[in-house]
Image (tube, grey):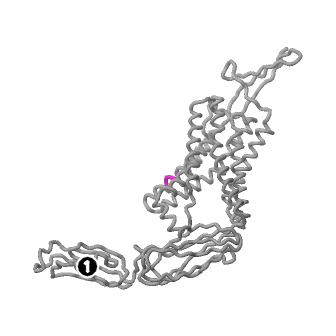
Amino acid sequence: MKSVAIVETGQCVTHSRVVSLFPNFLSFTLPKKYTQNKKMAGVETVFKSRGACASSSHTLNMCFVVVVLLGIPSVMSQSLSFTENDIKVLQEEVYQIKLLQTGAYNTSLKVAATIQHPDIVQLDPQTLDIPAGGGDTSYDISAHGISPGHSEIYFTVTPDGYVQKDALFLRITVMISKALNYVSYIVGWVYFAAWSVSFYPQIYTNYSRKSVVGLNFDFLALNIMGFTMYSLFNCGLYFSKAIQINYFNRFPRGLNPVQLNDVFFSTHAAFATIITITQCCIYEREGQRVSTVARSILATMFLVVIITGILSVAHVIEWLDFLYYCSYIKLFITFIKYLPQAIMNYRRKSTVGWSIGNIILDFTGGFLSIFQMVVNAYNYNDWVSFFGDFTKFGLGLFSLAFDIFFMLQHYVFYREAKEFVRVNSSDERSDASSSSDGREYVVLVQNWNADEKKYDLEAKA
């Protein structure tokens, strides 16, 4: 890259001076006393000596050096962009796309499209000539859906330097049916609602019983950690402009993966879990506490968060990487968080205290989530993504498997288990009934705790 140094010394400059080395340079502003045209090209540094110039006859006591970088076209006042980058087109449909031009270029440009999968979508025209000197305008491009699928389209602009690389791109999805697209949209909101409401049956159960006996504290501890990490990830990518810039620098043709409903779900889930934990501090819990194993796992996760946070503050890693570590913690917790509750139900031979409503709603959300993936895979002919996204698909199946296991525990394995009403002491419960022959049967339940319940049966005439 060439450069020119302009040095003024030994002479007073009382009028404005123009430095024009190329017609389309980056702009730089000097004091009006020293320049008439404030738009100079790519100025790197200006050095000023002490003193001031009193008149044109006085000796200039100020020295400045302007380093001009040649050959860099202006990208500040002109731009090319599409009105939308992510487009869904029906098969055999022609969809109109608008390319917007802002400002005027001092030379003509040629925009050429490169289509990733020409058998999925075609553009007309595939090349555009943008004349020099034109003002704000728009250009129509037709996208013709050929067959179902996804295709990226990127554009090259010649001559180079007038449009930022990777700034022009399209992601076009060709679908079989708009009806299936609406079904997918509705299903998405239904499972979002089911997952959001799924926290409240447990809260209601705790409130109505005034007890959290039967609810595993390890499950709650892992849950609050997981949803806190999930909230950090979603809020960081949705609200932080700096992190968004970092994300788009890393994935120039990407879209923000976090939407407003993701932020709402994660923060709401954390809030609902905090309510449940508060109930554990208020209601009867039979001495239950978070296990040593769970504490060790949580301590390790906190250590990872602290270390990666320090590395982010020290600029060793990007804040985006810190958020990714938070998301990995959430994924790991999703794999293990149901185990403590399932083991506890097995040891107690009962699901009393563990809300089955929570499980039914969670199963509904998980089933509809996978159903949506199937609908989209068929509608977009994208079975590779369906089976290729192992994390989402695997986690969905894993959660469904645990939900089915919990329903078996509740409705099949331990369906005869019941909760007895406290009558006299803290360690004895009874349930009395009369038979048709006049004999009264009393069931005494002793040694009730969070791990097991033992009971003795005694018949009295």
Provide the residue span drawn in magenta: 303-307
Residue 267 visible in the snapshot: yes
Look at the magenta stretch and give its main secondary structure: helix
Is 53 rendered above or below residue 454? Answer: below
Where disc 1 sits, the SS reads strand
Q: Is 267 left, or right, of 184 in this rendering?
A: left
Residue under the point 76% across and 26% down: 455
User: Residue 281's x, y, as percent?
Assistant: 57, 33
Q: Residues within 10 Å of mark 1 (few under 14, many from 20)?
A: some
> Quick check: 16 left or right of 56?
right
As displayed, is residue 400 above or below residue 37? above
Residue found farthest to the right: 437
Q: Is residue 306 magenta?
A: yes
Amino acid marked by disc 1 = Val
Q: Is residue 234 left or right of residue 440?
A: left
Of 344 and 291, nearer the camera is 344
Say which quadrant the N terminus sits in: bottom left
**Residue at the (50%, 76%) spot, across then down:** 165
The image quarter containing residue 426 is top right
> Which of the image's four quarters has the C terminus?
top right
Tell me, yes or no, if residue 229 can be seen here.
Answer: no
Is residue 409 left or right of 424 when viewed as pictured?
Answer: right
Q: Which residue is mark 1?
A: 65
- Name the residue at 74% across, 64% down: 378
Residue 377 sits inside the magenta stretch: no
Splitting the image into 4 quarters, where does residue 217 fall?
top right
Q: Residue at position x 76%, y 38% from top?
A: 410
Q: Nearer the viewer, residue 88 or 137?
A: 137
Q: Is residue 456 above or below residue 155?
A: above
